[in-house]
């Protein structure tokens, strides 16, 4: 069975998915990676009232036309339910990693030696790197720590 799987953001990925759903008569699953347009509206990134109305309409239209929704967290699923105008299946599938590969108890001495890190503290940011993710705090912390040799 064919299924359309559209993953946002941007929210506009739902438009071609709806068109294909109608044209091919196949189910459409919408994966919500970010709460759009709520997040940019609340952060003041999108302030134009007309644009806000269009984006809120688009969000509801996509939710109405998809067969089911995938959310990345239960909190996100709650946010989606608050927008829905009808009952819709929402499945929570959190982002994850292979815990057999990324474990804090694995000896990283070979990598540390190869990179010349020794016993210095090594920090890794693996998340999204956008304005809404607070990356400026990571950059500020790095700036404050750059002169620390340890």
Image (cartoon, rainbow, N blue to C red):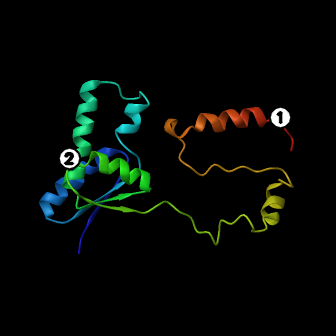
**Along the line of sight, the residue nearer the viewer: 112 or 31:** 31
Assign a secondary structure to mark 1: loop
Which class describes the residues within 10 Å of circle 2: few (<14), some (14-19), or many (20+)?
A: some
Q: Residue at x 36, y 29 (%)?
A: 46
Query: First in sequence: mark 2 or mark 1?
Result: 2
Q: Residue at x 81, y 66 (%)?
A: 110
Q: Position of residue 25 (x, y in %)?
A: 13, 65
Horizontal placement of 100 versus 71: left or right? Answer: right
Q: CA distance from mark 2 to mark 1?
A: 52 Å
Picture quarter containing residue 53? top left
Picture quarter containing residue 146? top right
Picture quarter containing residue 141? top right
Q: Residue at x 84, y 38 (%)?
A: 148
Quadrant where the C terminus lies? top right
Residue denoted by label 2 = 61
Residue denoted by label 1 = 147
Quadrant where the N terminus lies? bottom left
Position of residue 15 relative to residue 49, above or below, is below
Which class describes the residues within 10 Å of circle 1: few (<14), some (14-19), or many (20+)?
A: few
Q: Do residues under tags 2 and 1 come within 8 Å of each other at their CB atoms?
A: no
């Amino acid at each position: 069975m064919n299924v359309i799987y559209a993953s946002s953001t941007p929210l506009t990925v739902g438009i071609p998915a709806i068109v294909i759903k109608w044209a091919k008569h196949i189910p459409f699953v919408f994966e919500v990676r970010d709460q759009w347009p709520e997040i940019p509206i609340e952060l003041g990134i999108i302030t134009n009232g007309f644009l806000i109305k269009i984006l809120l309409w688009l969000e509801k239209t996509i939710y109405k036309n998809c067969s089911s929704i995938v959310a990345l967290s239960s909190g996100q699923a709650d946010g989606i339910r608050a927008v829905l105008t009808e009952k819709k299946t929402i499945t929570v599938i959190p982002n994850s990693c292979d815990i057999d590969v990324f474990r804090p108890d694995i000896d990283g001495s070979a990598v540390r030696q190869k990179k010349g890190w020794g016993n210095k503290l090594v920090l890794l940011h693996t998340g999204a790197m956008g304005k809404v993710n607070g990356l400026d705090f990571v950059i500020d912390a790095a700036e404050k720590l750059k002169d620390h040799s340890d």
